[in-house]
Amino acid sequence: MQITSIAAIYFLFWVMSAFLMLPFGVRTAEEAGEAKVPGQADSAPVNFRPGKLALRATIIAAVLTALFIANYTYGWVTAADIDVLPKPPAAA
């Protein structure tokens, strides 16, 4: 596998991980016991930390990319393994 392919796979895993990690660890003003700014949405986060989110996404993406490359190399799960509707054998 080429290094550019690995980088592209890592980037896709990073974006997916960052997007999935967005709602975790975020508290609203009501949950944090802080006053809301006039016009602020009730669901607006008070403690959004992009650095912490990026670090978590980086670690998760690195693990997922390593697992993907290991599976690609050793062939643990192939397309035939996940074919839920196999074709019937051909009649002779």
Image (spheres, rainbow, N blue to C red):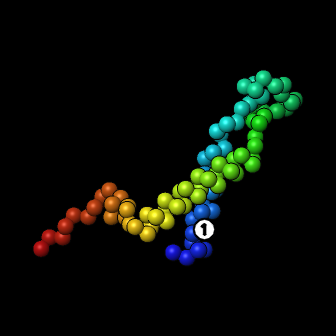
Q: Residue furthest left?
A: 92
Report the residue at 18% width, 70% height from top.
Answer: 90
Q: Identify the residue under disc 1.
A: 8
Report the residue at 35% width, 58% height from top.
Answer: 82
Q: Secondary structure at mark 1?
A: helix
**Residue 16 falls in which quadrant of the image?**
bottom right
Q: As rendered, which of 15 and 62 lies closer to the eye?
A: 62
Judged left or right of residue 41, residue 85 is left
Question: Which image quadrant: the C terminus?
Answer: bottom left
Q: Label 1: few (<14), some or many (≥20) within 10 Å?
A: few
The x and y percentages for residue 75 are 38, 66
Q: Residue furthest bottom?
A: 2
Report the residue at 64% width, 39% height from top.
Answer: 24
Instruction: State how many labels appear.
Output: 1
Report the residue at 28% width, 61% height from top.
Answer: 86
The x and y percentages for residue 43 are 73, 33
